[in-house]
Amino acid sequence: MAKNVLLVDDSSTMRKIISRSLRQAGLDFGEIYEAGDGQEALAVLEKESIDIVLSDINMPNMNGIEFLREKSNRPGIKDIPVFMISTETGEDIIGEAKSLGAVGALKKPFTPDKVNEVLGPLM
Amino acid sequence: MNSFTEINDKLIESTIEIFTGMVMMEIAVAGVPLAKLGPLKKSITGMVGLAGTHKGVLAVHFPQEVALAVTSNFLGMDVEEVNEDVQDAIGEIANMLGGNLKTILSDRGKDIQLSLPSTIFGDEYAFSSQAEGDQVILPFKAPAGLFYVEVELEP
């Protein structure tokens, strides 16, 4: 069954690019939802049926790390997998994201082939 | 990595990677690095600040016609004026370049924080840092014209 995806990035451009890359990668997904920061993402997760989250780290209001921390405290949504897509791919910050439940990370810039390679197994 | 020559080479590599892989636009280096840029006319600048072990700013300056072409390619739709999409796209390019610069300057980007990207645009403006420090301006040629990647780092 196709999976519903939530894209979390403060850049509307990047949300469009990721959405386009998912299509170009030929991945089987259902609805694509969008959020501009961690707070908006939590609201979408509480309301919609989301199977996987693709999240930026460096965002205003609530960044990706704060989002992971808050999500881990909410029983209804804490097990939804989150994959980080960010310019921030230092071992320290990705290590922190993984310790808070992130299942992987993809560095910007990326190509549709790379999206297919790293996200394909999750879809 | 401290040598500006090494930083230049890596930054050129990163810029070409971003444009080829994500903007879907072929670009090339357009000559040697510059020491100074004159006033920017009918341009848009995306920038991010660096703080921590390295302090400074990365900026990318596009004449408006180049910014429109870049955004059109980036989004896969025609863009005819500098609007929120253009500002967002140019800011995101600065953000990606800033992320790469972090990794270039520090071991895997540790101990450097990146600000959120911002943009400025107008009919004529000058871009300068108040800090006396190392500076490089890399010129690139895109199909629609020249653009510049600028890095200023505090000593």
Image: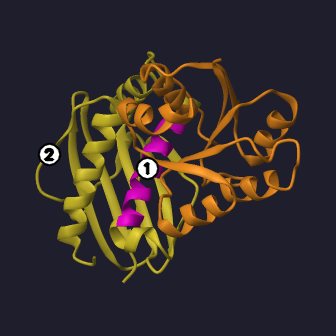
Q: Which chain is orange?
A: A
Q: Residue at x 82, y 27 (%)?
A: A48
Image quarter hosting the N terminus of chain A:
top right
For the stretch drawn in magenta, the main secondary structure is helix
- Chain assignment, label 1: B
Q: Are marks 2 and 1 in contact (CB under 8 Å)?
A: no
Disc 2 versus disc 1: distance between alpha carbons?
A: 21 Å
The residue tagged 1 is B96
State the mark number for residue B30: 2
Q: Is there one chain holding both mark 2 and mark 1?
A: yes
Is the residue marked by circle 2 packed among few (<14), some (14-19), or many (20+) residues within 10 Å? some
Which picture quadrant has residue A24? Answer: top left
Q: Residue at x 32, y 35 (%)?
A: B21
Magenta residues? Answer: B87-103
The picture places residue A33, in percent across and down from the top left corner, at: 70, 26
Residue that protrudes farthest toward the bottom in the picture: B155
